[in-house]
Image (cartoon, rainbow, N blue to C red):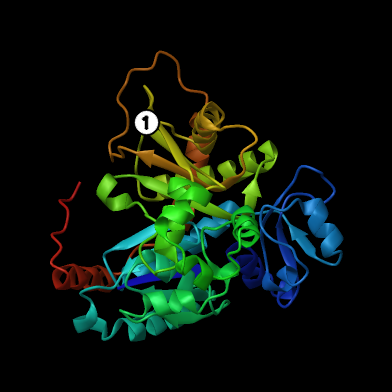
Amino acid sequence: MFLHVDLDAFFASVEQLDFPEYRGKPVIVGGDPESRRSVVSTCSYEARKFGVHSAMATAQAKVLCPNGIFVHGRMKRYHEKSKEVMEIFGNYSPDVQQMSIDEAFIDLGGTEKLFGPPEQTAMRLKAEVKEKTGLTVSCGLASNKYVAKIASGINKPDGFCFVAPGEEEAFMLGLPLSKLWGAGEKTVEKLKKTGFSSIKDIHSASLELLQSIFGKAGGSFLYMAVRGQAAETFGSDAKNHSISGERTFPYDLTDSYIIETALLQLCTEVQMRMLTENWYSHTIHLKIRYGDFTTVGIQRSYDQNFETENELYERVKSLFYEKWEKGRGIRLLGVGAGNCTHTPSQQFELFERDNQKTKDLEKAVLQINRKNKASGVKLQKARLMEAKNIVPPKER
């Protein structure tokens, strides 16, 4: 069984946690609302009631929510809280796949002897996150990751939804079209224009018909999704020795500035994890999914490791403009570092690199916030690995 855990309105929730005067009020994390080019990163549920959402221009958010509290993001603080939550997840399974700074998949298979039925484990995990971090999470439990992903969004915030094995198809057929995760606004609009007004309508169509209307990729996705099958693939960091993050947007992105802002945020997430987990990499991969479900990727290895957020961002941005078909709306972006190693590059450099101060600063901030793991946590993880017949990796 897979548990998908999503931190509720994460950035805004951290702001409300740190500043009690913000609680119960519309908090909008992003750039300056007076700037035409700044965008919303995240907003609280109070702000969402006004129609504000991520990737929206902050100027537009100001119009929709004039009394909103606009704050600049504090990525290092968000990463610190994310790390606290991810460490709790690790207490329940050795198989935690972090998808981004605020979401993860947890494989609960084989943990029943330690914690009982997966649905009870999920509720226990939710309570522990709330008690130890002050944050709430929404969880979805299902036999595959795609259904678990959708289930986690059913009862937000602080929600839980369990889809029992064998009930995946019935679960999907009971949802409105708006809950079909992965289908953007343009796809939903096209579905309705072609006579598909519900998930049941899509379910009644043949694979051939769907592919003739939405293309091979789009048609296959819709056919599998409405049947509760694994319609989306989610790569595994641990198996590929990579660190990655991806983000699906509420609507297709076409503005280059908004896209660059999204790429920068993903680069920040990846770099923070690289530093925290002591990884080094000279290989970067980029994933782009368009509104019609077409997915493209590009990977490139460089002579030297990237060592700062800015280095990673500049390389990612270069790859993006090399690959992006300008004008096509983007539904999802993913950034990753591959071929990761715990050994830094030993290549001789004639001149000291000009990013040394930045690198030292990033490491210093992480060192200040680093917390020692208790021996009891290590013992519990060893028991989990034993329960799931996982051989621990050799100490590096």
Q: Residue at x 48, y 69 (%)?
A: 150
Picture residue at 51% right of the left edge, 30% below the top: 323
| Residue 298 sits above or below residue 162 on the image | above
Q: Where residue 20 sits in the image (x, y, percent)?
A: 69, 75
Amino acid identity at mark 1: His
Q: Nearer the viewer, residue 243 or 55?
A: 55
Residue 347: x and y, percent? Answer: 32, 21
Q: In this image, 226 relative to 321: left or right?
A: left
Pointer 1 local density, CA inside 10 Å: few below 14, some 14–19, many at least 20: many
| 71 is higher (above) or lower (below) than 158 | above
Q: Assign the N terminus to one quadrant of the image.
A: bottom left
Which residue reaches farthest top?
A: 350
Frontmost residue, 198 versus 208? 208
Q: Residue sitting at 49 percent across and 57 percent down? A: 101
- In this rendering, the answer to whether 239 lies above or below 257 is below
Percent across and percent down for residue 113 are 19, 83
Count of numbered circles on the image: 1
Q: Position of residue 154 (x, y in %)?
A: 53, 76
Q: Left or right: 255 with respect to 272?
A: right
Mark 1 highlights which residue? 282
Residue 11 in view of the camera:
yes
Q: Is residue 284 left or right of residue 44?
A: left
342 vs 229: above or below: above
Q: Nearer the viewer, residue 358 or 170?
A: 170
Corner quadrant of residue 13: bottom right
Q: Going 43% across and 32% down the picture, which residue do you hit?
A: 306
Q: Is residue 104 visible?
A: no
Where disc 1 sits, the SS reads loop
